[in-house]
Structure formats: C-alpha cells, structure tokens
Amino acid sequence: MSLYRARPFAAVIALAMAAAGCVSQGDLQGIESRLTDVQQQLLQLRKDGSSKAEVAELGTQIGEGNRALASGQAEIATRLGELARQLEQLEAKLEDTNFRLAQLAQQIAATNQELQALRDAAALQQSPSPPAPSAAKGDPQALYETAYNDYQRGNYDLAILGFLQYLEGSPAEDLADNATYWVGECYYRQGRYQKAIAQYDEVLSRYEGSDRIPSALLRKGFAYLELDQQAQAVVQLQHVICDYASTDEARLARQRLQALGIEVQC
C-alpha cells in the first residue's frame, strides 16, 4: 500500500468513526499517527529489501570478477610456462647452431690450408729446378745435390727419384747412407709413414757405423707414433736415449717420451 493511498483510507475511517460518535478527535489523531509510522516502516523495509538485493547483486558481480581474475591469472601462468619452454628450445637450437658454425669454421680453415698447400705444390712443380748439365748425369755428387735441393723445396717425388738414382749408380759412395735417409724423410713429409720406416730400417741395417743412425732411430720412432703404434715408438726412442745419450736426437727423444708421460728406462 502506497503512502498516497493510505492517507485517504485513514481519513475515511477517521470520519466514519467520528460520525458514529465512537471516538474523539484525539483518538483519531493517534490512529493517524500510528498509520503514518506503519507506512514509514513499510517504506524503510522496501528500501532495505532493495539495498539487500543490490548488495547481493554486487556480491555476485564481485564473485564473477574474482573468478574471471583467477581464470586470467591461470591462463597467464600457462602462457608464461609455454613461453619459457619455447625460450629453452630456442636457446638449445642457438647453442647447436653455434657449435655447427664453429665446426664449419674449422673445416673451412683446414680446407683453405689444404688449398694453399696444393697451390704451393703446383707453383713449385710449374717452376722446377733447372735441369743439371748433361755432364752431371755421370757425376754422383751433382745428382745428390740436385735431389737434396728438390727435397728442400718440397718437391719430394723429384727428390726421391734423384736419391734413388744416386743410390742405383753409386751404392758405395760416402753419401749413400744420407741418400737413403733422405728418401725416408721424403716419405715421412708426404705422410707415407710405413715407407719411411722401411727406409730408416735400410739405414740401420746397411750402414751400421753411419752418423745417420740416431736420426733414423728417432724418425722411425716418430713415424710409429704417427701410426698410433706407441709401443714400437717407445722402443725406438728408448734406443736413441740409451745408446746415443749425448746427441741432439737423444734430447728430442727424451722430450717426446716425457710428453707422453713415459719414464725413460736404460
């Protein structure tokens, strides 16, 4: 019941009661006062009910907002986790790429060195040593010197050919042990270590008193090391140290064994 409707209704009741002579003017005022209080209470109740509904609605909205916030935080956490995993994968790929680039750089450097070596060899072959005079064909000393010059220039195939020709024509000459040794050195420089060892053995077996024996033993030991035959190498190097202790070859052999962590035993 609204305020505007309650007031006419109360007036009618008051007039009726007054006409009937049932109540006094004071009684009517009291009744009207009480009705006014009831109306005010009713309005207040309505206002309170509206406020409670608004509060409830506001609480619902807050709850939904909290749920949305929690959902958003969970989504953000999930996304951050995915980004972290992607970052780890990218870092791993970057590390692998850097490793491959380093390997490629090493390969390129090695290839460039090989190409340069080939260019140098080609240049030397294109400008060979001037041929020896025809009279030198019968001169063992000139043949030996020509072969040795080829060795010094890195023309190892020419040097091998010249030293072998020298040995074939003059096997008993004083430089035969040297020529045999230099053939071994040519093979060693070419990386043909088995052939080098065979030539060093020629020096050791055919020229027992030669001053090339310490060098032949030393280089034979080095050739075995290049072939990963350490036990054989140690035997040769120990031989140099024990039998030719005062030579430079013995010093070099000792240094190599020390580098290998092997104690010298004589």
Image (cartoon, rainbow, N blue to C red):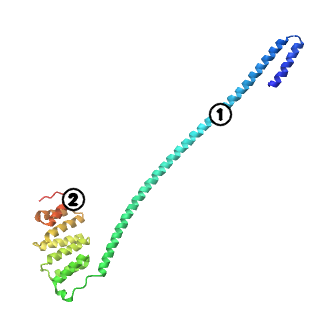
Residue 25 in sight in this render = yes
Q: Secondary structure at mark 1?
A: helix
Does the CB distance between marks 2 and 1 fall below 8 Å? no
Q: Is residue 79 above or below residue 18?
A: below
Location of the N terminus by quadrant is: top right
Q: Say which residue appears at 50% left-offset and 49% top-offset.
A: 83
| Residue corresponding to mark 2 | 260
Q: Secondary structure at mark 2?
A: helix
Label 2 packing within 10 angstroms: few (<14), some (14-19), many (20+) = few
Q: 224 or 89: nearer the eye?
A: 89
Q: Point out the tag, 2 or 1, that comes first from the N-terminus.
A: 1
> Amino acid under label 1?
Leu
Question: How many callouts does the rendering have?
Answer: 2
Q: Position of residue 262 (x, y in %)?
A: 18, 57
| Residue corresponding to mark 1 | 58
Q: Say which residue appears at 66% left-offset and 31% top-offset.
A: 56
